[in-house]
Image: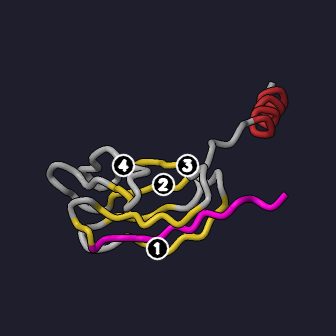
Amino acid sequence: MIRRILLVLTVLSLTAVPAQAHGPTIEISHHEMKPPLLNLFVGTTVHFANTVAMPGGHVVVDEGGTLESPPLEKPGDGWHYTFVEPGTYHVFVKQHPMAKAKIVVIPKKK
């Protein structure tokens, strides 16, 4: 009986599907975004992670008006954005414009 249980547990561990992972993370605070520069390929999803409390929430935007996050109010709140077009994106926290990052998106090589 113990051998059957061990066999079942072994099979289950081999067939488990790992959780989908996002790409790089940018950490948000009142004064900065870390890292301040990301280089990535088209199709990469970036996770924006709030690290400090902010009444009303931090909102991530870019200079070109391409993206805007919902308010990220508590530490641990996050938002994902997938970059589908190549280009340079200058992102910042709407409430703290000096908290910024540059994201350079290039096409995938074929």
**Element carrying mark 4:** loop
Q: Which label lies toward us, 4 or 2?
A: 4
Residue shown at 46% from the left, 73% from the top? 35
Residue shown at 52% from the left, 56% from the top? 46
Mark 3 belongs to which amino acid? Thr
Residue 12: where, in percent of width, then height? 76, 32
Q: CA distance from mark 4 to mark 2?
A: 13 Å
Q: Quadrant of the N terminus?
A: top right
Q: CA distance from mark 1 to mark 2?
A: 12 Å
Which numbered disc, 4 or 2, marks the residue that appears first in the sequence? 2
Q: Tell me which secondary structure the magenta stretch mostly adopts.
A: strand
Mark 4 belongs to which amino acid? Glu
Which numbered disc, 1 or 4, marks the residue that appears first in the sequence? 1
Q: Quadrant of residue 53?
A: bottom left
Residue 52: where, in percent of width, then height? 25, 62
The residue labelled by disc 2 is: 47
Which numbered disc, 1 or 2, marks the residue that appears first in the sequence? 1
Q: CA distance from mark 3 to mark 1?
A: 17 Å
Which numbered disc, 3 or 1, marks the residue that appears first in the sequence? 1
